Amino acid sequence: MPRTALAGEGLCDHPGRNNYTYEIDLDGDTAGSYVLSFIEPNQRVLEIGAGSGAIAKHIVGAKRCDLSAIEIVDASIEKLRSFTHDIEKLDLNDPAWVDTYASREKFDIVLAADVLEHVYDPWTVLAGMKKVMVEDGSIILSLPHIAHAAVLGTMASGDFKYGDWGLLDKTHMRFFCVRNVEALTASCGLKIVDAKAVRKLPEETEFVDIWMQLPTELQQAFEAYLSALVRPHKNLITQLRTQRVRSRRAAGLRWCRRTLVAGTSTSGRSGD
Protein backbone atom coordinates (compact mmCIF):
# COMPACT_ATOMS: atom_id res chain seq x y z
CA MET A 1 0.00 0.00 0.00
CA PRO A 2 1.24 3.57 -0.65
CA ARG A 3 2.51 5.36 2.42
CA THR A 4 0.71 8.61 1.72
CA ALA A 5 -0.17 9.19 5.36
CA LEU A 6 3.40 9.40 6.56
CA ALA A 7 5.35 12.62 6.49
CA GLY A 8 7.74 12.63 9.44
CA GLU A 9 10.75 10.41 10.03
CA GLY A 10 13.10 10.90 12.97
CA LEU A 11 11.15 12.64 15.70
CA CYS A 12 12.39 11.44 19.06
CA ASP A 13 15.11 9.18 20.35
CA HIS A 14 13.31 5.88 19.79
CA PRO A 15 15.56 2.96 18.77
CA GLY A 16 12.72 1.12 17.06
CA ARG A 17 11.69 4.08 14.92
CA ASN A 18 11.66 3.32 11.19
CA ASN A 19 12.56 5.91 8.56
CA TYR A 20 9.90 6.68 5.97
CA THR A 21 11.09 7.47 2.45
CA TYR A 22 8.52 8.38 -0.16
CA GLU A 23 7.65 10.77 -2.98
CA ILE A 24 4.88 13.37 -2.82
CA ASP A 25 2.42 13.92 -5.65
CA LEU A 26 1.69 17.63 -5.27
CA ASP A 27 -1.74 17.16 -6.85
CA GLY A 28 -2.61 14.00 -4.94
CA ASP A 29 -4.94 13.25 -2.03
CA THR A 30 -2.08 12.84 0.42
CA ALA A 31 -1.02 14.36 3.71
CA GLY A 32 2.18 15.70 2.14
CA SER A 33 0.40 17.50 -0.70
CA TYR A 34 -2.14 19.05 1.67
CA VAL A 35 0.59 20.18 4.07
CA LEU A 36 2.38 21.92 1.22
CA SER A 37 -0.84 23.58 0.05
CA PHE A 38 -0.95 25.48 3.35
CA ILE A 39 2.54 26.93 2.88
CA GLU A 40 2.76 30.30 1.13
CA PRO A 41 5.93 31.07 -0.87
CA ASN A 42 8.88 32.98 0.56
CA GLN A 43 8.26 32.21 4.25
CA ARG A 44 10.62 31.33 7.08
CA VAL A 45 9.72 27.72 7.86
CA LEU A 46 10.79 25.39 10.67
CA GLU A 47 10.04 21.74 9.85
CA ILE A 48 10.04 19.52 12.92
CA GLY A 49 10.81 15.86 12.28
CA ALA A 50 11.88 16.60 8.72
CA GLY A 51 13.15 13.10 8.01
CA SER A 52 15.02 12.67 4.75
CA GLY A 53 13.44 15.72 3.16
CA ALA A 54 10.37 14.50 1.25
CA ILE A 55 8.48 17.66 2.22
CA ALA A 56 11.58 19.82 2.68
CA LYS A 57 12.59 19.62 -0.96
CA HIS A 58 9.26 21.13 -2.02
CA ILE A 59 9.37 23.79 0.71
CA VAL A 60 12.70 24.95 -0.67
CA GLY A 61 11.97 24.26 -4.34
CA ALA A 62 8.36 24.93 -5.30
CA LYS A 63 7.66 27.23 -2.33
CA ARG A 64 11.03 29.06 -2.35
CA CYS A 65 11.04 29.24 1.45
CA ASP A 66 13.93 29.70 3.89
CA LEU A 67 13.95 26.33 5.66
CA SER A 68 15.27 25.26 9.06
CA ALA A 69 14.79 21.71 10.30
CA ILE A 70 14.80 19.51 13.39
CA GLU A 71 15.75 15.85 12.99
CA ILE A 72 17.35 13.22 15.21
CA VAL A 73 18.29 10.36 12.88
CA ASP A 74 21.84 10.85 11.58
CA ALA A 75 21.22 9.22 8.21
CA SER A 76 18.22 11.46 7.62
CA ILE A 77 20.18 14.55 8.62
CA GLU A 78 22.75 13.80 5.93
CA LYS A 79 20.00 13.60 3.30
CA LEU A 80 18.42 16.81 4.60
CA ARG A 81 21.64 18.72 3.90
CA SER A 82 20.63 18.69 0.23
CA PHE A 83 17.85 21.14 1.12
CA THR A 84 19.10 23.10 4.13
CA HIS A 85 22.19 23.40 6.31
CA ASP A 86 20.22 24.85 9.23
CA ILE A 87 19.51 21.52 10.94
CA GLU A 88 19.37 20.88 14.67
CA LYS A 89 19.62 17.37 16.10
CA LEU A 90 17.10 17.51 18.93
CA ASP A 91 14.91 15.11 20.94
CA LEU A 92 11.36 16.45 21.13
CA ASN A 93 10.74 14.42 24.28
CA ASP A 94 13.12 16.81 26.04
CA PRO A 95 11.20 20.09 26.60
CA ALA A 96 14.52 21.95 26.40
CA TRP A 97 14.52 21.53 22.59
CA VAL A 98 12.78 24.88 22.29
CA ASP A 99 15.64 26.67 24.10
CA THR A 100 17.80 26.15 21.00
CA TYR A 101 15.70 28.80 19.26
CA ALA A 102 15.30 31.22 22.19
CA SER A 103 17.65 33.85 20.77
CA ARG A 104 16.88 33.28 17.11
CA GLU A 105 14.46 35.02 14.77
CA LYS A 106 11.03 33.41 14.95
CA PHE A 107 9.40 31.54 12.09
CA ASP A 108 6.42 32.39 9.91
CA ILE A 109 5.44 28.71 9.74
CA VAL A 110 6.20 25.83 12.10
CA LEU A 111 5.41 22.44 10.58
CA ALA A 112 5.03 19.06 12.26
CA ALA A 113 3.84 16.52 9.69
CA ASP A 114 2.97 13.22 11.40
CA VAL A 115 5.10 14.02 14.41
CA LEU A 116 3.01 14.56 17.53
CA GLU A 117 1.74 10.99 17.61
CA HIS A 118 5.33 9.83 18.15
CA VAL A 119 6.11 11.90 21.26
CA TYR A 120 5.14 11.28 24.87
CA ASP A 121 3.77 14.79 25.49
CA PRO A 122 2.33 16.38 22.33
CA TRP A 123 0.80 19.20 24.40
CA THR A 124 4.22 20.42 25.52
CA VAL A 125 5.71 20.00 22.03
CA LEU A 126 2.88 22.02 20.45
CA ALA A 127 3.28 24.73 23.10
CA GLY A 128 6.98 24.85 22.22
CA MET A 129 6.13 25.21 18.53
CA LYS A 130 4.00 28.23 19.37
CA LYS A 131 6.94 29.83 21.21
CA VAL A 132 9.13 29.81 18.09
CA MET A 133 6.39 31.15 15.78
CA VAL A 134 5.90 34.84 15.01
CA GLU A 135 2.75 36.36 16.52
CA ASP A 136 0.75 36.24 13.29
CA GLY A 137 2.35 33.04 12.02
CA SER A 138 0.94 29.56 11.43
CA ILE A 139 1.48 26.07 12.76
CA ILE A 140 0.72 23.22 10.35
CA LEU A 141 0.02 19.74 11.69
CA SER A 142 -0.68 16.40 10.08
CA LEU A 143 -2.05 13.73 12.40
CA PRO A 144 -3.33 10.20 11.80
CA HIS A 145 -7.00 9.84 12.67
CA ILE A 146 -7.62 6.75 14.77
CA ALA A 147 -11.44 6.83 14.42
CA HIS A 148 -11.39 4.94 11.15
CA ALA A 149 -13.67 2.02 10.33
CA ALA A 150 -10.67 -0.12 9.40
CA VAL A 151 -9.25 0.32 12.92
CA LEU A 152 -12.57 -0.72 14.43
CA GLY A 153 -12.36 -3.72 12.15
CA THR A 154 -9.03 -4.78 13.63
CA MET A 155 -10.49 -4.52 17.13
CA ALA A 156 -13.57 -6.53 16.17
CA SER A 157 -11.29 -9.22 14.76
CA GLY A 158 -9.28 -9.36 17.98
CA ASP A 159 -6.11 -8.15 16.27
CA PHE A 160 -5.06 -4.54 17.00
CA LYS A 161 -2.62 -4.76 14.12
CA TYR A 162 0.50 -2.77 14.93
CA GLY A 163 2.88 -2.40 11.99
CA ASP A 164 5.98 -0.62 10.75
CA TRP A 165 3.97 2.27 9.31
CA GLY A 166 0.44 3.63 8.99
CA LEU A 167 -2.36 4.35 11.44
CA LEU A 168 -1.11 1.77 13.93
CA ASP A 169 2.62 2.37 13.49
CA LYS A 170 4.20 0.56 16.44
CA THR A 171 6.11 3.72 17.40
CA HIS A 172 2.92 5.79 17.90
CA MET A 173 2.73 7.00 21.49
CA ARG A 174 -0.53 8.95 21.15
CA PHE A 175 -3.76 8.51 19.19
CA PHE A 176 -6.16 11.23 18.04
CA CYS A 177 -9.81 11.59 17.08
CA VAL A 178 -11.25 14.90 15.84
CA ARG A 179 -12.22 16.14 19.29
CA ASN A 180 -8.75 15.30 20.62
CA VAL A 181 -7.21 17.48 17.91
CA GLU A 182 -9.58 20.30 18.80
CA ALA A 183 -8.74 20.00 22.50
CA LEU A 184 -5.00 19.76 21.84
CA THR A 185 -4.93 22.97 19.83
CA ALA A 186 -7.26 24.86 22.16
CA SER A 187 -5.11 23.92 25.18
CA CYS A 188 -2.23 25.83 23.60
CA GLY A 189 -4.30 28.94 22.84
CA LEU A 190 -4.47 28.13 19.14
CA LYS A 191 -7.41 28.00 16.76
CA ILE A 192 -7.88 25.90 13.65
CA VAL A 193 -8.35 28.23 10.70
CA ASP A 194 -8.28 25.62 7.95
CA ALA A 195 -8.27 21.86 7.64
CA LYS A 196 -8.13 19.10 5.06
CA ALA A 197 -8.26 15.35 5.27
CA VAL A 198 -7.01 12.33 3.38
CA ARG A 199 -9.75 10.01 2.15
CA LYS A 200 -8.99 6.32 2.56
CA LEU A 201 -11.69 3.69 2.45
CA PRO A 202 -11.03 0.63 4.66
CA GLU A 203 -10.20 -1.52 1.64
CA GLU A 204 -7.52 1.03 0.65
CA THR A 205 -5.70 0.87 3.98
CA GLU A 206 -3.03 -1.39 5.40
CA PHE A 207 -5.84 -3.31 7.18
CA VAL A 208 -7.54 -4.51 3.99
CA ASP A 209 -6.91 -8.19 4.78
CA ILE A 210 -8.70 -7.97 8.14
CA TRP A 211 -11.45 -5.70 6.80
CA MET A 212 -12.38 -8.03 3.96
CA GLN A 213 -12.86 -10.93 6.40
CA LEU A 214 -15.50 -9.05 8.41
CA PRO A 215 -19.19 -9.73 7.76
CA THR A 216 -20.70 -7.18 5.36
CA GLU A 217 -23.26 -6.18 7.98
CA LEU A 218 -20.50 -5.30 10.44
CA GLN A 219 -18.58 -3.31 7.82
CA GLN A 220 -21.68 -1.29 7.00
CA ALA A 221 -22.47 -0.70 10.68
CA PHE A 222 -18.97 0.64 11.41
CA GLU A 223 -19.00 2.93 8.37
CA ALA A 224 -22.49 4.28 9.04
CA TYR A 225 -21.87 4.92 12.74
CA LEU A 226 -18.56 6.72 12.29
CA SER A 227 -19.78 8.75 9.32
CA ALA A 228 -22.73 10.01 11.37
CA LEU A 229 -20.57 10.67 14.42
CA VAL A 230 -17.49 12.49 13.12
CA ARG A 231 -17.31 11.88 9.35
CA PRO A 232 -13.91 10.20 9.90
CA HIS A 233 -10.88 10.26 7.66
CA LYS A 234 -7.44 8.69 7.75
CA ASN A 235 -5.31 11.82 8.21
CA LEU A 236 -6.13 15.29 9.47
CA ILE A 237 -4.07 18.23 8.21
CA THR A 238 -4.68 21.48 10.06
CA GLN A 239 -3.42 25.03 9.94
CA LEU A 240 -3.37 26.80 13.30
CA ARG A 241 -3.00 30.39 14.39
CA THR A 242 -2.92 32.12 17.77
CA GLN A 243 -6.36 32.21 19.35
CA ARG A 244 -7.63 35.76 19.78
CA VAL A 245 -11.42 35.47 19.79
CA ARG A 246 -12.85 32.17 20.89
CA SER A 247 -16.03 31.10 19.17
CA ARG A 248 -17.67 27.77 18.49
CA ARG A 249 -17.45 28.20 14.74
CA ALA A 250 -13.84 29.41 14.66
CA ALA A 251 -12.39 26.98 17.16
CA GLY A 252 -13.78 23.67 15.98
CA LEU A 253 -12.33 21.47 13.26
CA ARG A 254 -15.81 20.59 12.06
CA TRP A 255 -16.64 24.27 11.50
CA CYS A 256 -13.54 25.36 9.58
CA ARG A 257 -14.11 27.66 6.64
CA ARG A 258 -12.76 25.06 4.23
CA THR A 259 -12.80 21.52 5.53
CA LEU A 260 -12.33 18.64 3.13
CA VAL A 261 -13.80 15.74 5.03
CA ALA A 262 -13.53 12.22 3.72
CA GLY A 263 -15.06 9.44 5.71
CA THR A 264 -14.97 5.69 5.50
CA SER A 265 -18.26 5.57 3.62
CA THR A 266 -18.70 6.26 -0.08
CA SER A 267 -20.05 9.73 0.70
CA GLY A 268 -17.53 12.47 -0.01
CA ARG A 269 -19.65 15.33 1.30
CA SER A 270 -17.60 18.39 2.21
CA GLY A 271 -17.79 20.11 5.53
CA ASP A 272 -19.35 23.55 6.08
Image: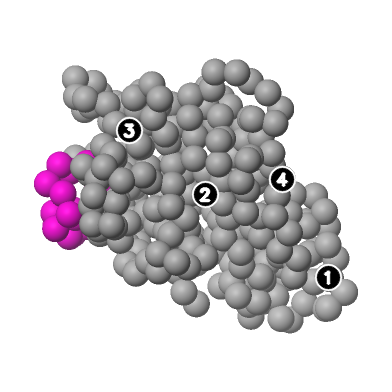
Residue type at tag 1: Gln
Lateral position of residue 221 relative to residue 181, left or right: right
In reply to whether residue 64 is colored magenta, the answer given is: no
- Of label 4 and label 1, which has the lower sequence position? 1
Q: Residue placed at 23% from the left, 21% from the top?
A: 102
Q: Taking 29 as reference, is 175 above or below it?
A: above
Residue type at tag 2: Ile
Residue behind mark 2: 237
Residue type at tag 4: Asp
Residue 257 at x, y = what percent?
A: 63, 40
Q: Is residue 266 visible?
A: yes
Residue behind mark 1: 220
- How packed mark 4 is, by other alpha carbons closer than 10 Å (few <14, some 14-19, many 20 or more), is few
Lateral position of residue 82 relative to residue 37, left or right: left
Does the residue at mark 3 contact the one at mark 1 (Cβ under 8 Å)?
no
- How packed mark 1 is, by other alpha carbons closer than 10 Å (few <14, some 14-19, many 20 or more), is few
- C-alpha separation, residue under disc 3 versus residue under disc 1: 44 Å
- Of label 3 and label 2, which has the lower sequence position? 3
Start-end of magenta stretch = 68-87
Residue toward you, 191 or 97? 191
Lateral position of residue 70 relative to residue 131, left or right: left
Residue behind mark 4: 272
- Of label 2 and label 4, which has the lower sequence position? 2
Q: Taking 183 as reference, is 222 above or below it?
A: below
- Of label 3 and label 1, which has the lower sequence position? 3
- C-alpha separation, residue under disc 2 versus residue under disc 1: 26 Å
